[in-house]
Amino acid sequence: MSPAPPSSSSNAGRAEIPSLLAPGIEHDPYPLYRSLRESFPLVRDELLGAWLLSRYSDVRAALGDVRLGSAPTGPGPGHRRLLEPVLRAATERTAHVLARRMSGRREVDLVAEFSAWLPAAAAVAALGLPWEDAARVREWCRTGSVRPGGVHPDLVGLLRPHVARRRARPGADLLSALCGARTGGQALSDDTVTALAGTLLTGGGEATALALASFLANLLGHPAQLDLVRARPGLIPGAWAESLRRDPPTPVVLRRATAPIALGGTTLPTGSVVACLIGSAGRDPFRFADPDRYDIFRADPAHLAFGAGRHFCPAATLAGLAAECGLRALLDAMPGLRLAPGFRPAPRGLMARAPRLLLVRTR
């Protein structure tokens, strides 16, 4: 292991650092990440209008600091045992339907026909919403008109009538479970139920679609590791965590300071925007040995793709289920699944990163 990295510096050599918004960075941000970690772990990006934080330990601490955005609220960990079975059943059904539709064709694009649809469709099914809502949610997420955790008016308008009906006549779906959940002895409010369902639909939709595309690309790009997972499905959770470490769907997370905060020897004032570079943190050699390598047997991937802390996150739960159930369904329906001859996945994007095309042979 190399000696400890130099201490943080907020201004030394600042003019030499290119912006995250510089041309070409979205195609390959890793040389910039390396330079930031080694010499400029806290630096102001004037074009982005944010302070860049790039080392694993700093990014993890920032994500868990309540002064950089408020902590999410919702059902406690006990409710996870109530909600996860409903999510799992819906995700399994949806994954198998999508996989079987592709299995009769020789070559398909897993992004367009699987990963882009599975999270939104599974979330809609779990919540007990009409199937046609999956296309609406997917389009809102794709066009950016809804942000994870947000309360876009169209989403509120979609969910409110369903919440009212589940209050009156509960069913076996996840929306009914949220309506019946209690925190501190009190039932969740309609606003909280709507926000949690919205987080599942929007965060689970786009972020999970990207993460799932990268997960499939990583395994298909490493056939020997895919064969191991095929033979030992118990390896899937570790393979998923490793993919989130190496290729997180949202490599840059912006947070705003709600109070003065000391980072890297510099005190940032209230209102400062901090860019937590999750894509850089996951490849920090001071935290991970051989960090660019994809290794399903890595002992402690410790990814930050869905933040840090112990808060319940329906979208993160759905993401893990989409990876597990999705991969199982694909391998079951297409035992000969492999990359199309001559094709190599090409991730792109800075704020949201994943392959946009994933051509495979099904047999």
Image (tube, rainbow, N blue to C red):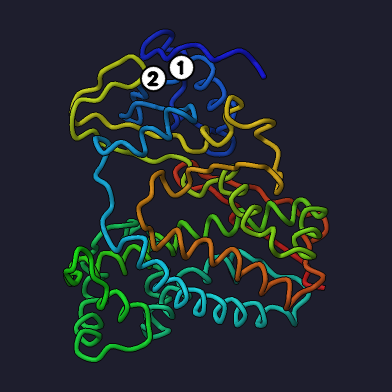
Image quadrant where residue 78 sits: bottom left
The amino acid type found where label 1 is placed reads: Phe
Residue at the farthest top position: 12
Image quadrant where residue 31 sits: top right
Residue at the farthest bottom position: 169
Dot 2 crowding, Cα within 10 Å, few <14, some 14–19, many 20+: many
Where is residue 267 drawn, in percent x and y?
A: 25, 18
- Residue that badge 1 annotates: 40
The amino acid type found where label 2 is placed reads: Val
Front in this rendered view, residue 315 or 34: 315
- Residue that badge 2 annotates: 43
For the residues bearing labels 2 and 1, Cβ distance under 8 angstroms:
yes
Image quadrant where residue 258 sits: top left
Q: Quadrant of the N terminus?
A: top right
**Number of the label disc, if any, that sits on residue 154:** none
Dot 1 crowding, Cα within 10 Å, few <14, some 14–19, many 20+: many
Indicate left or right for 59 with 65 as reference. right
Where is residue 67 drawn, in percent x and y?
A: 24, 35
The secondary structure type at the circle numbered 2 is strand
Work out whether 346 lies above or below 90: above
Front in this rendered view, residue 336 or 15: 336
Where is residue 357 drawn, in percent x and y?
A: 63, 58
Indicate left or right for 256 with 208 as reference. left
Work out whether 265 lies above or below 241: above
Instruction: Please tell me which residue is depicted at 46% across the width and 46% down the height of the picture.
Output: 250
Label 2, label 1: how far apart the Cα atoms are: 6 Å
